[in-house]
Image (tube, rainbow, N blue to C red):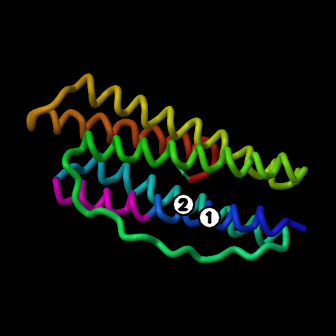
Amino acid sequence: MISEKMTKALNAQIQLEGQASFLYLSMASWCDKEGLEGCTKFMHRQSGEEREHMLKIFEYLSDVDGHALTPAIKAVPHEFDSVQDMFQQVYKHEQKVTASINKLMDIAVKENDYNTHNFLQWYIMEQREEENLMRSLLDKIKLIGKGPMTLYYIDKEVEKINAAELAAEAAAGEA
Ligand code: OFO
């Protein structure tokens, strides 16, 4: 049986993952409008992943006799100053998610909730990977530099990273 406090905290995490999914979907649409095909694919894949992260918590709460609540999603931005700014926002959001997962883990530890502790391990690893991915992507974007001529190369680079992510997911049997 899961505590009320843990259930509430996991429902807050459901909201955060759902919010990320919608934010990334909006980013995918903006990239599409800007003619950035690689970035569009990348953000659609990220959006889908976040939805999966959200659904995983639904399943978990069902397994432990909790009640998962469909979250209210706040309005997301539809325009971004630049592709650099957009990826910076993604990185920031991922850092927020990591901090939130850490707080969930704190509660699980304090409550001796070994089931949730075990469940959260996957998210801790996932966040480490996500932050690492976003950091290396931002590093590449910085290296390529700014200006309209560089957008083409940034997009190609992001497309390559996306293809590598898809290949890794397929190898892990997730796709
Ligand atoms: Fe689910 O927040 Fe990123 O990965």
* In magenta segment, residue 32: yes
> Hey, what amino acid is under mark 2?
Leu
* Residue 12 numbered mark, or none: 1
The residue at the point 56 percent across, 45 percent down is 169
The residue at the point 17 percent across, 38 percent down is 151
151 vs 113, nearest the viewer: 113
Residue 37 vertical placement versus 125 (above, below): below
Label 1: few (<14), some (14–19) or many (≥20) C-alpha neighbours in 10 Å: some
169 vs 82, nearest the viewer: 82
Place of residue 18 in the rendered image (x, y in percent of width and height, measured from the top left): 52, 65
Q: Is mark 2 within 8 Å of ligand 1?
A: yes
- From this viewpoint, which residue is outermost toward the left? 148
Place of residue 124 in the rendered image (x, y in percent of width and height, measured from the top left): 67, 42
> Hey, what amino acid is under mark 1?
Ala
* Residue 146 numbered mark, or none: none
Which residue is tagged 2? 16
Label 2: few (<14), some (14–19) or many (≥20) C-alpha neighbours in 10 Å: many
Residues rendered magenta in the picture: 22-34
* In magenta segment, residue 106: no
The residue at the point 30 percent across, 34 percent down is 157
Mark 1 in CB contact with mark 2 (< 8 angstroms): yes
Residue 136 vertical placement versus 127 (above, below): above
| Count of numbered circles in the view | 2
Place of residue 23 in the rendered image (x, y in percent of width and height, measured from the top left): 39, 60
